Amino acid sequence: MGQYLFRVLGSQRYAGGVKHSRGRHQCLRAVAQGTQVPKTSILVVGGTGTLGRQIVRRALDEGYEVRCIVRPRQNPADFLRDWGASTVQADLGDPTSLPAALVGIHTVIDCATARPEEPTTKVDWVGKKALIQCAQAMGIQRYLFFSIHNCEQHKTVPLMRIKACTEEFLQQSGVPYTIFRLCGFMQAIIGNYAVPILEERQVWGTTDQTRTAYMDSQDVAKLALASLRVEGTVGKRIPLAGPQAWTVSEVIKECEKLAGANAKVTEVPVWLLKAAHGFLRFNQWGRDAADRLAFVDILASNETFSADMAETYKLLGLDPSSTTTLQAYLQEYYSSILKKLKQVGASSKQTDFYV
Amino acid sequence: MQLHFTSLEARGYLRRPYTGGPSTAIRAGEQKGSGSGRPVSTEERSKGSGEIRRKGPSGGGPDPQDDKSFNLEDFNPLSLGRRSRRIFDDVWTQFAKLSSPLGSQLDNELDSLRLAGSPPDDGSAQAATTRVLVVGATGRVGRVLIRKLVLRGYAVSALVRDASAHGLPQSVAIIEGNVNDYDSCRRAVQGVDKVVYCAGARSPMLVDEKNVSESGVQTVAAAFQDAKNQAANRGRPKAASFNTAKLMVAAKQMFTQWRVTGLNEESEDDSWGMSGQRQAVKKWARPARQRNSATAYINHRQSLVFEGSLPVRNAHATVGCDLQQPPGKPLLANCEGLTMRVASDGQPYWLELSTGAGHTYSTRFSAGSAFTNVRLPFNVFRPQRGAPPQWDPADASHISIRRDARPPDTVVGGSVETNSLEAGAFHLEVLRIKALPGGSESDFVLVSCAAAGKTHSSAAVEGVGAIKRAGEACLRRTGLGYTIVRPAELVEEPGGYKALLFDQGNRIRSSISCVDVADVCMRALHNPAARNKTFELAHETPAPLGMGSYELVAHLPDKSNDYLGPALSNMEKNL
């Protein structure tokens, strides 16, 4: 805990320092302008995440030179290097590590977010601010940022508030930016509903009527990389929504249909989540945990998370029909997992060990 | 760890997932968050939930769903502690997940399910069992190609000149060596199923170009073939599917059955020229003692020598025999063509195949005085004397080599030759004739270059083009299933979004992204339409100059569509 506090203080001090020491950054800019940066050099921040890894794959496949920021840790993300990306050790929580990672980079794709065990503010706000300042100082020529749909309308949710503020900060920074506003990933459905239903485990649902237009993270990656080719996307905020908006109960029904099993659904009432959230908020030790539950405010609002994508597809020059629907996605998931199951021979496998 | 233990035991009585209220649940999560092993345990748990667990007799621990009734075992504090800890975890992760639509805990599992970006049409269905050798892995095309292959799950080997400076993915097996060194090539092709050759010369010197684009191709292809044949001889199961092992049609003692036929021995021919005057000149030029003659014998090299003299116009001589068909299966069934190792005087000869019905199909070949391999694919055989144009090589029952008397036009020009006693003499030596077995896929993909499209055609560029063509010819002669991609001028830019132009016939004059070339190479590995094809490749240009009269097939590449098959399906094979 002590080390963690020190890190935060250190980073804030550095972030303050960035504002005043202009001379150093003019120097850096001169260096950046002096050498031509190849247009294909990309830095992906958050390359190990759900979206980040799809972006890395797609970018490598389209022939970009991809560099990824990975945290200095014991088991580094080897899969990124196996795919052919290069990695640099840096940490959004430690802004001194960022400038070196940005040398020789034309485009920054920022799809990082705090891990569940990390404090949201430190990574998503302090770290991102430092990254944008760095990008500005070093003359990064393109900055892709992933935000959340309608985040400015939910300022009570910490992550949404941070995303909204970061959008604003990015717009004022002068970096040529493109902001993508996501609704939800289909990949999240697999862990929450598809796997538990197949394993005949307890499924947790909510009683709300919030609708989310889930999108395959591969499609998000495709659209994001398409935007790099289209000059008209600079300075735009682009919504990214799937073809159809779903409630949780509809998703569970679809999964049941495909898995051929009845789900044991435990409906968690929204008020219970709200109560948990409220309780945690008033405890110092529960702040971070409370932040994780903060989405309950959105659930309670019964909002529909979707957007009209016609303009997006037109702008990016892509075909809307090539986007994966949730049905098709789940179908593919179940068919491939059932095939795998047959190969394995349905053996029992205990992997949860709690000592 | 010890701390967890005691605190869990204390809460061991909790049974139902959430009746305990959020406070207990969240304490468990909080404890994990600040405690020792949170990230590790998250990953482990997510891995566990990605796997499919089935209730079975060998099931490990007690299932959380089955604990409706107590027995004595359930009061074991240790197991109670574990169970409750698991329930806490479940509750907490579910709570946290419920509220967030973004992010997934199962990224690694979804990747391993190959849900990630790999529809089966780009060959990735076979990727897991295929090892591809990329020659030229550090080049512009090779670098991207390797990433594309690795992303789709191929096993990849790379032959590089300098193993210390490559920057290749970790999963690539790197072999240091040179394309002109047979031993290093042999090491590189070990266990390899397919080869993609996209190496380029490092300097503009023609010697370098020749080493890489001509003799390099030859060496790698030879090493690949040798390794395959060796593996097939040893009876490795994987190599059994490899069928470039050619079928012997004729060699050594088999030549004893070859007979000279069809020699028209008349020295006078009624069908001589049209004008009497010209005929008179010819008669004067040719001494009366000259007669058509042809013999065939087997020499010290155990090769068939076919020689003689055909001074008379329209005369021809043929040597051949009936094909020795193995019982049950026609010799040339499922074959792609013939390859022969010959040396001759550089004059044209015809190889003829006759069917049982009496139809004859032939194609022309020629060879220099040194022994070379000549490749004669069946689709270049043309029908003779009113035979139906469609034929099946499996029907062939007789093989022969024909020598026609020199056509008069070439004779009239040079009076020296006409007067010479050697006029019409010929000499052909055949070491062996083999049949190339057909196959469905290409074994060897070669990246060459398009001849046209160079804005300034200098002698050096033409020299490079000639060397590349020679390299292509080397590959065709080996009998491996090949795909030769001739890209237009290469540019380094992201690929996958411009329409591609596939063409045969040197008409392309635009540029192409290295990435698209790599994509085509990768798709060609498993696409039957790509086997034994040579084609040019370029980006579609807005206004193709002077190409209006040609129909070019343009397909927009996409990950999810197989553009290569339709684009190549109506292209000529074996060109």
Image: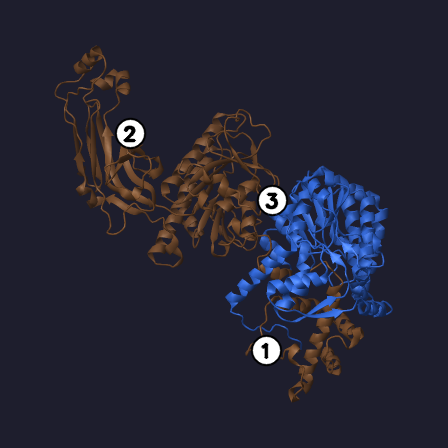
Q: Amino acid at mark 2?
A: Pro
Report if the CB atoms under discs 2 and 3 are less than 8 Å apart: no
Give the crowd class for mark 3: few <14, some 14-19, many >=20 residues within 10 Å. Answer: many
State which chain disc 2 sits on: B
State which chain disc 1 sits on: B
Give the crowd class for mark 2: few <14, some 14-19, many >=20 residues within 10 Å. Answer: some
Residue linked to disc 3: A63
Describe the element under mark 2 as helix, strand or loop: loop
- Residue at the limit of the structure toward the top, as seen here: B277
Per the model, the C-alpha gap separating discs 1 and 3 is: 47 Å
In which quadrant is the C terminus of chain A drawn?
bottom right
Per the model, the C-alpha gap separating discs 2 and 3 is: 48 Å
The image shows residue B495 at horizontal and vertical percentages of: 60, 41
Is circle 2 on the same chain as circle 3? no
The image shows residue A224 at horizontal and vertical percentages of: 69, 47
> Which residue lies at the image location 52% right of the left edge and 29% below the top edge?
B453
Q: From the viewer's perspective, is the residue at label 1 or at label 3 nearer?
A: 1
Colour displayed for chain A in the image of the structure: blue
> Which residue lies at the image location 17% right of the left edge and 14% below the top edge?
B284
Colour displayed for chain B in the image of the structure: brown
The image shows residue B31 at horizontal and vertical percentages of: 76, 72
Describe the element under mark 1 as helix, strand or loop: loop
Q: Amino acid at mark 1?
A: Gly
Q: From the viewer's perspective, is the residue at label 2 or at label 1 nearer?
A: 1
Q: Which quarter of the picture shows residue A216?
A: bottom right
Using the rendered image of the protein, determine whether residue A34 is visible from the camera's viewpoint: yes
Per the model, the C-alpha gap separating discs 2 and 1 is: 78 Å
Front-most of A18 and B505?
Answer: B505
Q: Amino acid at mark 3?
A: Gly
